Amino acid sequence: MLEDRPTASSAPPWPTAYPKGYAVVDVETTGLSRDDRIISAAVYRLDAQGAVEDHWYTLVNPERDPGPVWIHGLTTDVLAGAPLFPEIAAEFAARLDGRVLVAHNAVFDWSMIAREYARARLTAPVRQRLCTIALSKELGLPLPNHKLESLAAHFGVVQERAHHALDDARVLAEAFVPSLRAAAAKNVRLPLLECRPLTEWSEPSVPRQPGAAYRGGGAGSWRPSRKRPACPYPNPGRYEPGKPLKQGMRVAFSGDTSVDRELLEDRAVEAGLHVATSLSRLTSLLVTNDPDSYTSKVVKARQFGTPVMDEAAFGQLLQDVADATDG
């Protein structure tokens, strides 16, 4: 159960820089790629100190096959009568408006939400997000891994229906509240990241015929491919764990990313990094969410001893990239 807010006599002063409200979100989707769709969404609204204000849940008709039914349990028949995303967009937006979006691996939930709003020619009213994975790292929680069930177990939260958006949002809210209060007690700086709305969705050049099987890949695009200018900074060498990224570092990406790959690469370029399409002994860092895979880049990274980190950690480091002139 979510706790009541601490009393004034029992709690330390609340950090004035903390957000004024949170929207704890979970979305279930047809898959993990840029062209997948939301099939259900849930939001728990919390006030500044974590007290629950209300919660909301909806199914969403994705207008395509539902993907891994064995995971989320939502069949085509169940979703057939559900509203389309544009029909729930206003209600969803009202529950996000003016709040920090909180999710477990928040970059994924935000990306899926942003794409749905872009398809609907709308903009999600979210300006910041907070990832509970990043927050657990900031707090130094002794977790065996970064799965939601591990975070829940740490705080004694019981999952009732894993991969059901409403129950996952409840579980996350119940785990986030003590995390938030622990951070406030220690005056920990919350790992907030900017949310950049997507505005460049375009319809596929050849529309999918009603009833046709969804095959993925190319159902739409986010921005035209283009050649990026050369990085103006020299390569300072490999990334050193515990230190900031530095302008000029050569960064390679491998495997699926929660953020659209081009958007993630754009952020890296804007920060002054060199995005490499291949991995060599000169590569400073490999970013991958699956370090145990056998992709050519991961294999080469092992051979060369190239540092490897996941997307969430890379997103944190992108907030404060050191100038090429430093040191």
Image: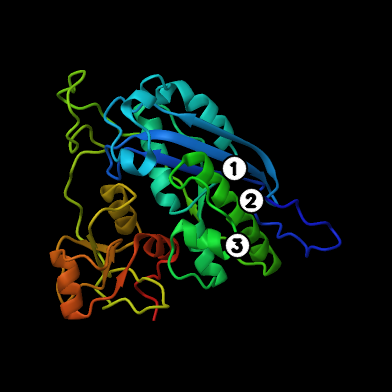
Q: Position of residue 25 (x, y in %)?
A: 51, 43
Amino acid, disc 3: Phe
- Which type of secondary structure does the marked residue at label 2 adopt? loop
The local crowd at label 2, few if under 14, some if 14 to 19, many if 20 or more residues have their Cα within 10 Å, is some
Q: CA distance from mark 1 to mark 3?
A: 24 Å
Q: Find residue 22 and report its horizontal and vertical position in percent.
A: 61, 46
Proximity of marks 2 and 1: CB atoms separated by less than 8 Å = yes
Q: Which residue is mark 3?
A: 155
x and y, in percent, of residue 200 in the image: 31, 34
Q: Which residue is mark 2?
A: 19
Foreground: disc 2 or disc 3: 3
Dividing the picture into quadrants, the one containing residue 63 is: top left
Q: Secondary structure at mark 3?
A: loop
Q: Name the secondary structure under disc 1.
A: loop
Residue 212 percent across, percent down from the top left = 17, 23
Query: Upstream in the sequence, badge 2 or badge 1?
Result: 2
Give whichever of discs 1 and 3 has the lower sequence position.
1
Q: Residues within 10 Å of mark 1 (few under 14, many from 20)?
A: many
Horizontal placement of 291 versus 271: left or right? left
Residue 179 in view: yes
Amino acid residing under circle 1: Arg
The image's mark for residue 99 is 1
Amino acid at the residue labelled 2: Pro
Marks 2 and 1, how far apart at CA: 7 Å
